[in-house]
């Protein structure tokens, strides 16, 4: 079952195409990475999914149903450009946002109390937002995003402006919500941030989809048959003739095996030559490597 | 609908519970009352009663009792002592000063005559005017007696002219006086319209800019439509405006009435007359008559038509201008200088409307008044001001219909700009771009 399905979605602005025939599916219950450099069209895509803007063409299905006016109440969206009413009190603010999401007054109050307790900030109810630190404000922002228990949570650059402690706090919450069954779309241009979090990814550039799929599969599909070998003792010279040596330093080798060879052959050759191997690993490419390989240049 | 209501409620409540709002709403009538009270107090201040010793060398008051009439603040006491004697001891005799009527006064035939007042304390303006008037009247009386003319005959020469205006069919046109009152009422309504549309329109704009600067706007429109947010804001802020006007409509007359009630004992209304009397003859009876007539005239005005129609025009004008302000606010974001330069043309429209209103009131049946009240940018200020002059009903209706259609059009157009503008960050929108936004699909 897919929580979200995009089919040939197109969004054109006057001089450029922000989203160019993009299709991908987000499986239920996953943490999904929406990746791409700044200006790739991530935010445009998200705004289409959240019905803030409408696609010029294509179909978006949420839980198998075409997105419509009730979609916003099923999605929790934390935009990249986010903020709160500075003069409002924490409690009032959350009550307002929760009711806009369709919660009744009573439900909103209960949910907010629960969440404030959970974050150990129950005493903040009557504090003005402007009295809180930036990190504290982000906690309130996060609560406001998930207060209506959305089935799909979309976070656009969720860690921007957060110190590592608060980033971890939010990260833990994301994991927990995911454990409880919430599907999460995680949009960022910082690819290293999602390597550890996401199970699936879609990579977009200049409005076009570059690739998508299961993270492990994507890495395997793009691997370069690179192996790192730690060893003890001396290395016979002819190993470098037989295999392509990417780099070698004291007791560490990086070897690229050609596609028609097997990593076992490399290992066998090393053993036959009395090299004492202490570790033997395949080096999978980072998402950044894959991105550079796919589009030919780096974002940063 | 429910969400729109939530937005209206928030926009309204956050504003009316603000200290600055409460202060301005309650403070303005209080300040007005204080100002009025202070003014009345200052005018009436020296009215603690001036006891004035009179040395009558001219023989103005001989033989008659109370030839110089007292009033509440000035009391005359004719003494037999000489001027020099009284100058010495007027304080011991508990007088405030000595009025000297010199002997040559009785012989003088000049129009301008001079009398003297001796005191170490100065007389107030009002008392001075009163004494001059009373002495003048007395001299006049004596001159008449001396001349041998019959007072009654002389009085018979006095003429006052009142011109009645009639329509050509001979009907008496009762509007001549009501025109004065209508001008006053029309101006007042015009002023209020101008300031309220200006103040609350720009309040909408600031609020839109604030939401964009705070970066909350995308959070909000992930749950509601941008149009709902804009409309909710316009309605909410408009209700704040109506609340303020409503409170003022009750408080200001209330405070003025209370103030005049409390001050009634302290201030002699005739002292105000005398002040007026300095400029020309403006006696008590005719002033009172004027005020009564004015009140009567105001009572007879068709308030049941004027007030609701004014409110309709206010709503039309407010929606028209505040939606334009909202669109501008969405386009500029946090750039205050940019915002100002964009609002100048809009404010100019309001100012032109204001000037046209003044012209139209001077000449309510001119073609300028007629045509400019059809222009929707001016009619919210112009038409309510003209209502007091009873324009034809179809003129009002036509003006209102044009205004409503234009307002709806601008709300729709502004919503298109707003929708794009609030999501644009980090770059300045040129007027050309703003025009393009109108044609974007959602």
Image (cartoon, coloured by chain):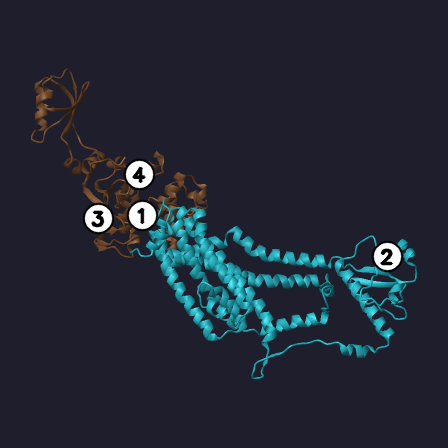
Mark 1, secondary structure of its residue: strand
Question: Between residues B416 and A99, which one lies in front from this camera angle?
Answer: B416
Confirm whether residue A274 shows in the render.
yes
Nearer the observer, disc 3 or disc 4?
A: 3
Nearer the observer, disc 1 or disc 2?
A: 2
State the residue position of label 2: B94
Q: In this view, does A237 lie above or below A40?
A: above
Percent position of residue B137, x then y: 80, 69
Image quarter where the N terminus of chain B lies is bottom left
Percent position of residue B25, x then y: 55, 56
Nearer the observer, disc 4 or disc 1?
A: 1
Confirm whether residue B224 shows in the render.
no
Chain of the residue under label 4: A
Q: Residue at x 84, y 63 (%)?
A: B76
State the residue position of label 3: A20
Same chain for mark 3 and mark 4? The answer is yes
Please tell me how many numbered marks the rendered image carries.
4
Point out the residue furthest to the bottom here. Answer: B169
Query: Colour in which chain A is shown?
Result: brown
Distance (Cα) linking label 3 and label 4: 31 Å
Q: Do the residues labelled 3 and 4 touch (CB within 8 Å)?
A: no
């Amino acid at each position: 079952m897919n929580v979200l399905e995009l089919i040939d979605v197109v969004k054109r602005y006057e001089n450029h195409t922000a989203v160019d025939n993009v299709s991908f599916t987000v499986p239920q219950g996953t943490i999904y990475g929406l990746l791409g450099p700044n200006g790739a069209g991530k935010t445009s895509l998200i705004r289409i999914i959240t019905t803030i803007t409408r696609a010029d063409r294509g179909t978006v299905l949420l839980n198998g149903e075409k997105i419509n006016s009730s979609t916003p109440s099923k999605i929790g969206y934390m935009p990249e450009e986010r903020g709160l009413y500075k003069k409002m009190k924490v409690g009032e603010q959350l009550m307002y946002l929760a009711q806009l999401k369709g919660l009744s007054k009573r439900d909103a109050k209960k949910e907010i109390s629960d969440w404030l307790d959970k974050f150990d900030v129950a005493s903040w109810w009557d504090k003005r937002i402007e009295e809180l630190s930036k990190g504290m404000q982000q906690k309130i922002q996060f609560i406001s995003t998930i207060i209506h228990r959305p089935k799909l949570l979309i976070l656009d650059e969720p860690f921007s402006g957060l110190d590592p402690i608060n980033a971890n706090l939010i990260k833990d919450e994301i994991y927990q919500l995911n454990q409880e069954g919430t599907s999460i779309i995680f949009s960022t241009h910082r690819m290293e941030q999602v390597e550890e979090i996401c199970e699936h990814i879609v990579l977009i550039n200049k409005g076009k989809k570059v690739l998508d799929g299961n993270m492990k599969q994507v890495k395997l599909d793009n691997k370069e048959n690179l192996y790192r070998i730690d060893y003890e003792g001396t290395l016979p010279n002819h190993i470098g003739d037989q295999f392509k040596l990417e780099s070698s330093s004291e007791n560490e080798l990086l070897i690229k095996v050609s596609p028609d060879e097997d990593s076992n052959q490399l290992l066998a050759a090393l053993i036959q030559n009395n090299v004492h191997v202490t570790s033997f690993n395949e080096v999978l490419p980072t998402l950044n490597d894959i991105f550079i390989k796919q589009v030919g240049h780096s974002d940063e | 609908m429910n969400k729109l209501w939530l937005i209206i409620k928030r926009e309204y409540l956050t504003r009316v519970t603000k200290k600055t709002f409460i202060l301005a709403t309650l403070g303005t009538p209080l300040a007005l009352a204080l100002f009025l009270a202070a003014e009345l107090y200052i005018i009436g201040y020296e009215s603690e009663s001036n006891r004035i010793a009179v040395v009558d060398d001219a023989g103005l008051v001989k033989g008659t009792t109370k030839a110089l009439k007292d009033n509440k603040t000035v009391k005359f006491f004719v003494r037999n002592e000489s001027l020099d004697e009284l100058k010495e001891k007027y304080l011991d005799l508990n007088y405030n000063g000595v009025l000297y009527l010199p002997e040559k006064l009785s012989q003088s035939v000049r129009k301008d005559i001079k009398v003297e007042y001796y005191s170490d304390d100065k007389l107030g303006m009002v008392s001075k005017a009163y004494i001059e008037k009373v002495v003048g009247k007395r001299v006049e009386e004596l001159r008449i007696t001396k001349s041998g003319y019959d007072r009654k005959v002389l009085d018979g020469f006095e003429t006052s002219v009142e011109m009645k205006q009639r329509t050509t069919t001979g009907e008496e046109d009762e509007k001549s006086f009501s025109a004065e009152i209508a001008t006053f009422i029309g101006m007042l309504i015009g002023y209020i319209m101008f300031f309220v549309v200006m103040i609350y329109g720009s309040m909408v704009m600031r609020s839109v800019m604030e939401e964009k600067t705070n970066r909350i706007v995308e959070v909000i429109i992930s749950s509601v439509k941008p149009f709902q947010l804009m409309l909710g804001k316009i309605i909410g802020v408009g209700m704040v405006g109506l609340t303020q006007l409503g409170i003022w409509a009750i408080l200001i007359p209330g405070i003025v009435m209370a103030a005049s009630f409390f001050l009634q004992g302290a201030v002699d209304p005739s002292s105000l007359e005398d002040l007026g009397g300095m400029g020309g003859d403006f006696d008590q009876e005719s002033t009172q008559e004027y005020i009564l007539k004015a009140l009567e005239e105001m009572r007879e005005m068709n308030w049941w038509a004027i007030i609701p129609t004014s409110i309709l025009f206010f709503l039309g004008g407010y929606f028209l201008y505040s939606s334009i302000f909202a669109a501008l606010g969405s386009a500029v974001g946090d750039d205050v200088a940019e915002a100002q330069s964009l609002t100048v043309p809009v404010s100019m429209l309001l100012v032109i409307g204001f000037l046209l209103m003044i012209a139209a009131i001077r000449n309510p049946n001119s073609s300028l008044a007629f045509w400019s009240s059809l222009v929707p940018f001016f009619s919210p200020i112009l038409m309510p001001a003209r209502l007091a002059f009873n324009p034809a009903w179809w003129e009002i209706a036509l003006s209102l219909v044009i205004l409503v259609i234009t307002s709806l059009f601008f709300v729709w157009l502004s919503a298109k700009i707003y929708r794009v503008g609030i999501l644009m960050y980090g770059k300045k929108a040129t007027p050309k771009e703003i025009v393009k936004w109108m044609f974007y699909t959602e």
